[in-house]
């Protein structure tokens, strides 16, 4: 029986991968990703950039082993090529292998803060991923780690007793990011973790991800246009447009040495949010 290989390198791999959504509502199947080849080395950090609808969430959800999540219209199917996560082929993963894989690959879906279980207080929300997998476990040793994370994201410990509806949007998002780390994933895939979070609180999420990376050496995939996050964490970048890779390279050079019109425009947009300052350093 196949097991995720925790020594795999690269941890994530696609070759000429195409992905589609099923036909629904009288429409045709939609090909959201076309011929994408990417690799994330062990301990590496890949940023995925691109305009809305370019396929970032589709690609990253598939790589995270979450292609079957959501309703039947949201199921992502392979339409060609190859993809592996921790050496397991992602196409036609059995339910059991999917469960095994997702124990090691953390995934923070877009707007995860808005989908925290409303009946649970923050403490139980944090323990939820563990409870779903292990019936009996000792909460005690995790208390220290939770306290450290709460401190990094500047949430008072009293918030552990509160319910999601009692928190601000930014606080909920910080809880969601903490929750995605609770199973100690060796690969973490985060989709716009700071989107909609106010400027004061975005760096706290970046700090938490940095802390996690330093502590565990986890590999990461970041879907983000947050300049602070790209500066602090990203190494390689791929730029998607209409499901295809239109740019790739190291974070410090890709935006300077591009011929591609869309990548130039993206660089201009990032520059207006101080990319130049970063690239000059
Ligand atoms: N369930 C679905 N059925 C059909 N098409 C879908 C479905 N979900 C997404 N798509 C389409 O797939 C394409 C890629 O969407 P995706 O959400 O991956 O893009 P994105 O780059 O993450 O966008 P955003 O930045 O807005 O989140 C879009 O054209 C979108 O309309």
Image: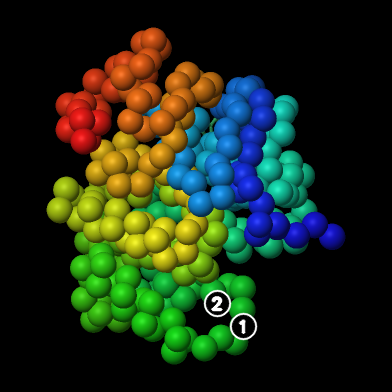
Label 2 secondary element:
helix
Question: What residue is drawn where x is 32% and y is 41%?
Answer: 230
Mark 1 vs ligand 1: CB under 8 Å?
no
Residue at the limit of the structure toward the front, as seen here: 281
Label 1 secondary element:
loop
Instruction: Mark 2: give few (<14), some (14-19) or many (20+) Cα within 10 Å.
Output: few
> In the rendered view, does 198 fall on the left or right side of 250?
left
Query: What residue is pinned by disc 2?
Result: 131
Residue 82 marker: none
In the image, residue 198 sits, relative to residue 248, either above or below, namely below
Q: CA distance from mark 1 to mark 2?
A: 6 Å
Mark 2 vs ligand 1: CB under 8 Å?
no
In the image, residue 79 sits, relative to residue 153, either above or below, namely above
Residue 32 visible within the image: yes
Q: Residue 228, image x and y in percent?
A: 25, 44
Are dots 1 and 2 in contact, CB under 8 Å? Answer: yes
Q: How many marks?
A: 2
Residue nearest the viewer, comparing 108 with 273: 273
Query: What residue is pinned by disc 1?
Result: 135
Q: Quadrant of the N terminus?
A: bottom right
Instruction: Mark 1: give few (<14), some (14-19) or many (20+) Cα within 10 Å.
Output: few
Q: Residue 274, image x and y in percent?
A: 17, 32
Question: What residue is drawn where x is 63% and y is 48%?
Answer: 9
Residue 72 visible within the image: no
Question: What residue is drawn where x is 74% and y is 44%?
Answer: 89
Q: Residue 207, image x and y in percent?
A: 28, 58
């Amino acid at each position: 029986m196949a097991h995720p290989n925790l020594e795999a390198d690269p941890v994530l791999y696609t070759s000429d991968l195409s992905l589609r959504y099923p036909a629904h509502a009288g429409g045709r199947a939609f090909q959201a990703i076309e011929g994408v080849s990417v690799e994330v080395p062990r301990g590496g950090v890949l940023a995925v950039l691109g305009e809305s609808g370019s396929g970032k969430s589709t690609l990253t959800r598939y790589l995270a082993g979450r292609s079957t999540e959501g309703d039947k219209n949201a199921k992502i199917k392979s339409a060609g090529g190859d993809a592996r996560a921790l050496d397991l082929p992602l196409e036609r993963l059995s339910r059991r292998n999917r469960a095994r894989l997702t124990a090691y690959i953390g995934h923070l879906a877009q707007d995860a803060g808005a989908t925290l279980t409303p009946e649970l207080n923050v403490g139980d929300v944090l323990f939820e991923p563990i409870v779903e997998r292990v019936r009996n476990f000792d909460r005690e040793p995790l208390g220290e780690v939770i306290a450290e994370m709460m401190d990094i994201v500047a949430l008072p410990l009293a918030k552990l007793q509160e319910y999601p509806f009692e928190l601000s949007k930014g606080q909920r998002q910080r809880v969601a990011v903490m929750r995605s780390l609770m199973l100690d994933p060796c690969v973490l895939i985060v989709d716009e973790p700071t989107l909609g979070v106010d400027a004061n609180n975005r760096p706290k999420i970046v700090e938490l991800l940095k802390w996690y990376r330093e502590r565990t050496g986890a590999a990461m995939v970041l879907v983000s246009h947050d300049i602070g996050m790209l500066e602090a964490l990203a190494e390689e970048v791929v730029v998607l447009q209409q499901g295809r890779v239109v740019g790739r390279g190291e974070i410090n050079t890709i935006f300077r040495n591009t011929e591609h019109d869309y990548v130039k425009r993206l660089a201009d947009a990032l520059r207006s949010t101080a990319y130049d300052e970063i690239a000059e350093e």
